[in-house]
Image (tube, helix red, strand yellow):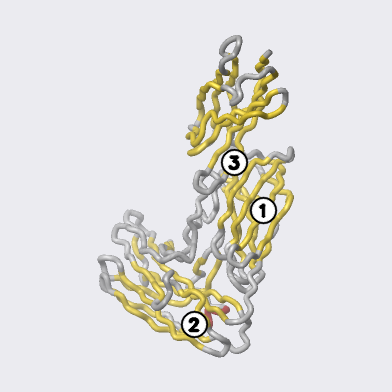
Amino acid sequence: MRVRIWVAALLSAMLLCGVLRPASFATAQSTEATPSPSPEATGAPKFVLTAVGDYPNDYFDDVEIAPGHSADLVVAVQNLGREPVSLRISRVDALNGINGGFVSGDETAEPTGSTTWIDFPEQVIDLAPGERIEIPFTVSVPDGTAPGQYISGLVARTANPLAIPGVGALDHTIGYAISVGILVPGELAPEFQLGTPEVEVRSEDAVLRVPVINTGNYLVRPSGDLILTNTESEQVLASRIEMKSVYGGFSAPMEIVLPGQLSAGDYTLDLSLADDASGATAQLDDVPVSVPAAPTVRGIVLTRVSIEANADPIDFAAVDLELNNDGSQLPSVAVMLDVLRDGAEIDSFPLATNQVLLHQENTITARYVPVDGWQPGTYTFRITVSSVDPQGGTETVLLEQDIEPAIVVP
C-alpha cells in the first residue's frame, strides 16, 4: 500500500479538521499562509517551495496577466533537511478544502482550466542538504479570457516512495504545494451563496455541513455567526465561523462538529456570513435541520442539587450540586445559577467559570447572596451548564434545568 503524506503550508492538512469543533474551535486548515518546513520525523526529508519575487506570503498571489499575454515567474525549491533528496515537481489543479483554503489536486491527473496556462514540464531534481535552486516558468493567458481570479498550483513530492519505519510493506510520499493565483484584469465581482445544510453522523460525531458556493469571479473569506435553536425556540448552539478562501467558481463546505451532548431531533439554523474585504454577504434564516441519533449517546445530567437558606432570617443560600458527564472531559465549562424573584429574573450568578468538566461525577458548592440583598418574595432558581471556547467564543448549552423547591423571604 502506498500513502501520500502532504506536509506543506498549502496542503490538504486539517482533513481531520478543516471541521470546526465547538468545544475547541479548531481553525487550523489548508490556507494560503506562509509555507513552513515539513514536520520533524526520523529520517524524513524536509523541503519547501517558495515564490521568488515580491510575494510576501511565499506563494503567487494575484499575478496580473491580460488576455493574450504571458508572465515569466520563478519558483524556488530548497532542501531543509540533513540528507540529499530527490523531488518530482509539476503543475497541479487547485481545489478548495473543508472550511476553505487551497488544497492541491491529484498531481497524476491531467491538468484542466488555468493549470493548462502554466508551462511547467514535470521534472525530477536532486538536492544536497541545504541546497536551493530556482526554476523559471511561464504563464500564458489565452485571448478572450474573462476577468477574474484563476487558481492553480505547483507541487513538489519525493520522487521515490519512503519506507515507514517498523511498518514493513507500507511506504509513503511527502509533498509540498503552493498556489499560483492569476488575476485577469477587469471588473471583479466577489459574491457567494449558501447551499442546503445537512447533518451527517461520522463515527461518534454529528457534523453540520453547509455548502459555500462562490458565484463570483474572485475569492471570498466568509466569516460570521451560526445559531442553532431547538423546537422550544431555545438557543442551543452559538458558534463564530471563520473560513479561509473560497475561490471564484469553487464551492467549499463549511463544517462544524456538533456537541456530543446535543440530542437527536429537529432544530432551526440561522447562519449569517460576510466577506469583509468586498462586503459580499449570504445568510440562511430559520432553516430546518434534523440531527440524527449518534451511535453513542452522551450527555450532562444534574444528579443531585440543593439550594437552601442557611438560617432564618436568611443570610445566604447554600448551593450544592453534582453533575454527571457521560461523555469525554470538557475543557471549559460555565455553570450559572439563574435567579428569579416572583417570576422575574434578577440575577445570573456564576457557580463555576472556565471549569474542566470531568468524565462522570463533578461536585460544585457555593454560597449565593443577591446583589441587592434578600428582598421579600419567592425566589426560584435554574441551573445552566454551557461549554465555552475561550478562543473562538463558541458557546454550547449542555443543560438547562429549573430547580425546586423555592426560597420564600417574608
Residue 321 placement: quadrant: top right
Q: On the rendered image, what quadrant is the N terminus found in?
A: bottom left
Which numbered disc, 2 or 3, marks the residue closer to the eye?
Answer: 3
Asked whether disc 3 touches disc 1, contact meaning CB atoms under 8 Å apart, the reply is no
Residue 236, placed above or below residue 359: below
Residue at the far top: name it: 312
Percent position of residue 273, x then y = 64, 58
Q: Secondary structure at mark 2?
A: strand
Asked whether disc 1 touches disc 2, contact meaning CB atoms under 8 Å apart, the reply is no
Q: Is residue 2 visible?
A: no
Residue 197, placed above or below residue 74: above
Identify the residue position indicated by label 2 in the image: 118
Q: Residue at x 67, y 15 (%)?
A: 408
Badge 3 local density, few (<14 within 10 Å), some, or many (20+)? many
Amino acid type shown at disc 1: Leu
Percent position of residue 124, x then y = 36, 78
On residue 271, the disc is 1
Q: Is residue 119 visible?
A: yes
Q: How many marks?
A: 3
Alpha carbons under labels 2 and 3: distance apart: 47 Å
Q: Residue at x 45, y 64 (%)?
A: 33
Badge 1 local density, few (<14 within 10 Å), some, or many (20+)? many
Amino acid type shown at disc 2: Ile
- Of marks 2 and 3, which one's residue comes earlier in the chain? 2
Q: Secondary structure at mark 3?
A: strand
* In-front residue for pair 220/12: 220
Identify the residue position indicated by label 3 in the image: 396
